[in-house]
Image (spheres, rainbow, N blue to C red):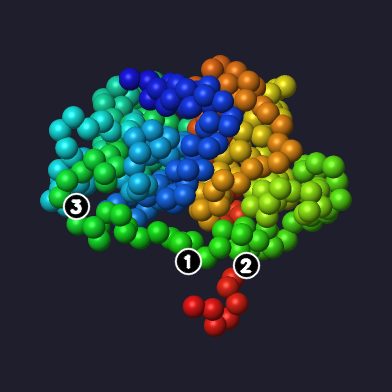
Amino acid sequence: MDVRQAITDRVIAMLEKGGNVFRERWTRAASHGMPRNGKTGAPYHGANVLLLWDAAIENGYASNVWLTYKQAASMGAQVRRGERAVLCAHFERKAMRDRRDSEIDANANGESHGEGEGDASDRGNGTGSNAMLCMPFWLFNVAQIDGLATSTSDEAPEPQSWADRSPIEGAMRFIGGCQANIQHGYARAAYSPAADRILMPDVDRFTSSEAYCATALHELVHWTGNEKRLNRKFGERFGDAAYAFEELVAELGCAFVLGHIRLVDATIEGHAAYLDNWLQVLRNDRTAIFTAARHAGEAYEFILARELPLPQGTP
């Protein structure tokens, strides 16, 4: 089983539905928060977020809480007969004596939480070689499982809950906390790497406060890629498609941030369409979506780490 290719094909199928479709599906799923494990409360990352979001909307799940078959059984619950799991991926570098046996052992592991890695291919075939193993694991939504206690399923702990706070407040606390150089009065939103500056239209040019925040967060993801910060460079690998690939990173990174603060139904205004370029890259490189999702996840974590704290005394 080529796990990378299988997941890439899934993401391509999402994108082929069109920009308006996949963005709307992701934001609807994000309204229930970031996907997380129902036993540990740990969030999922990278391309797995996209897969789980899409499955939640496709099947009408109201929860973004997931478990492996083994985890459900360990909690005294049972996956209903006939339910289908979502294929996810976990990447881990290992020193192997027998590559084939190691891959078989890795593929049997269903307890992994699936980080979004995968921009390095497997390499090495001999004794003592190192390889980046792509290990599949399968997740079931809590809606597919009988016998779960509510306290251990839908209410699994989250690192941060915005249920009682305004998404606009969350967006502004991230934008303010990053202290990016943002200048207004421009015809369209953009990030200038040379000047290390975010250019934005005036606030009253946007259709809503939500649209302004979503657009600013999209540009803020671009801002994280500056050499002073995360130093993202794709030219050597993606050539002429590097600019479009950076746009894919910003698309995913912004989706993760919007999902975290549950800012849904917000339009990223003035955003150019790079869908055809993304599809071409993904069709030519089975690891590209994992690279994009990893960089998007790093940008997401970078922004979240700079969130302005609540005023002292705020409950």
- Sequence-earlier tag: 2 or 3: 3
**Marks 2 and 1, how far apart in space?**
17 Å
Judged left or right of residue 301, residue 216 is right
Q: Secondary structure at mark 2?
A: loop
**Which residue is under mark 1?**
164
Residue type indicated by callout 2 = Leu
**Marks 2 and 3, how far apart in space?**
37 Å
**Which residue is under mark 3?**
148
- Total tally of numbered discs in the picture: 3
Dot 1 and dot 3 residues touching (CB under 8 Å):
no
**Which residue is under mark 2?**
308
Q: Secondary structure at mark 1?
A: loop
Foreground of the two, 7 or 26:
26
* Quadrant of the rendering where the N terminus is positioned: top left
Foreground of the two, 246 or 153:
153
- The location of residue 132, given as percent across then percent down, is 43, 31
Foreground of the two, 284 or 82:
82
Residue type indicated by callout 1 = Asp
- The location of residue 70, given as percent across then percent down, is 19, 42
Q: Residue at x 27, y 46 (%)?
A: 142
Q: Residues within 10 Å of mark 3 (few under 14, many from 20)?
A: some
Q: Is residue 63 above or below residue 236?
A: below
Residue type indicated by callout 3 = Leu
